[in-house]
Image (cartoon, grey):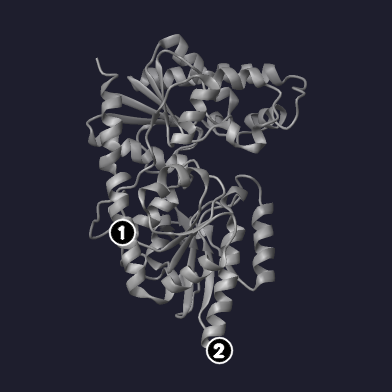
Amino acid sequence: MRIGFTSTRLAGTDGVSLETAKWAEVARRLGHQVHYCAGELGPDAPSGLLVPEMHFTHQDVRWIQDSAFGSGDAGQHLRSRIAGLTAKLKTKLMAFVSDFQIDLIIPENIFSIPMQIPLGEAWREVLLDTGLPAIAHNHDFYWERERFQISSVPDILESTFPPDLPNLRHVVINSLAQADLKSRRGIESVVIPNVFDFTTPAGSTGNTPAREIDDYNADLRQAIRLSAGDIMILQPTRVVPRKGIELSIDLCSRLNTLFANAEQAEDAARTVLVITHHAGDEGLEYLHRLQRQASSAGVDLRYIADLFDSHRGTASDGRKIYSLWDAYPHADFVTYPSLCEGFGNALLETVYFQRPAMVNRYPVYQADIGPLGFDLVEIDGKVSDQAVSQAHHLLTNPSRRQQMVNHNFELGRRHFSYRALAAALGPLLDSFQG
């Protein structure tokens, strides 16, 4: 089939874009053609259609979002502006379907998070008018996010986020979302968790990175000015409040104290907390708050998102750009203290790169990941003395560290590999053929 993947953006390092690329790769391996349609497309994206008005940062979309949420008062012109942009987008979406002869459309989070209300409305109308088969890949729902709780367009949220259509199947990425969707809307769904390519190439192939340091990323520690004795604590997430990064700072502070007390020397080991993903999706105040906390706690926090992108390359000013994956082989320890996650891409990456990690037991981890038997430093909303002790032991005991990461890798390969995705997605795609 010719499959169209569509979202507000399909570029960069956000979880939806990264997971879409995995689905697209597996769909190609299963013999299908893939095309993209979004408000932003990465340089390596499949052929498709770029529609700037689809992006959630477009000025018209920003105005609609500001008017639709945070108040129960719709305000003047909101409905008419939603309708106007919906009609404009619908025309372009129909052109995408026609020009690329799309057999099946996969809306990526369009019908679950109302960051682009007219886009959701437009795709719902296209599916209604054409009967085009579709699979809604729902990464997280609006009722899980506080900022969408007060709305002046509750009827639109009810009808479109998500819609219940005869030609639309729903996929969710965890069992909690599946139960929620059924209880709230009476809509059945299939659980297909996030995945990672657990094959182990000798060198990076673009889609699957090597697990070890290679010629390209060998200078990364030098590029971020780490000293030989620095302990690199990697925080591989976007900088938004639900990532719980203040807990990573607390861990680093307490580890620094342990190392200083144990070595009683001026050259005692110290941690450096390295953040590779961008801030700004929800404003910069959280980043500034973290920087103040780190300074007060004596933690060396390096926010170096400008050095990283989804793929290796060169910036416009000639600077070397690393892939997000390039940071993992250099990391001594990974922190993943998220308060809430749809699933946990960075956690799977950590397992693939065989790095020890601390994880906050967020709800989806408790329901779908932890019970599989992963061996991680676990916390429940705060960094405990036990967690600090466990992390210190892992950083100073190579045999224990190796035991942990080998065990986790085998579990990841069994449950969250591309092979596991193909086994789930293949039959779903086949059900639409003919």
User: What secondary structure is found at the residue carrying circle 1?
Assistant: helix
> As drawn, is 218 to the left or to the right of 69?
left
Mark 2 to mark 1 CA distance (whole Å):
34 Å
Nearest the camera: 117 or 249? 249
Residue 264 is tagged as: 2
Could you classify mark 1 by the number of other residues whose Cα lies within 10 Å: few (under 14), some (14-19), or many (20 or more)? some
Q: Is residue 263 above or below residue 338?
A: below
Tell which circle, 2 or 1, labels the residue nearer the N-terminal end. 2
Amino acid type of disc 2?
Gln
Q: Looking at this view, is 220 or 345 the one in front? A: 345
Residue 298 sits in quarter: bottom right
Asked if the residue under mark 1 is in contact with the one under mark 2, i.e. CB atoms within 8 Å, the reply is no
68 vs 143, nearest the viewer: 143
**Residue 357: percent from the left, percent from the top?**
44, 61
Residue 310: percent from the left, percent from the top?
42, 50
Measuring 27% from the left and 36% from the top, which residue is drawn there?
Answer: 422
Image location (x, y in percent) of residue 401: 36, 69
- Figure check: 376 above or below 30: below
Quadrant the C terminus occupies: top left
Q: Amino acid at mark 1?
A: His
When the figure is inspected, residue 267 is found, relative to residue 332, above or below; the finding is below
**Neighbourhood count class around disc 2 (C-alpha, 10 Å): few under 14, some 14–19, many 20 upward:** few
Q: Which mark is residue 407?
A: 1
| Residue at left offset 67%, top offset 27% | 64
Q: Residue at x 59, y 19 (%)?
A: 158
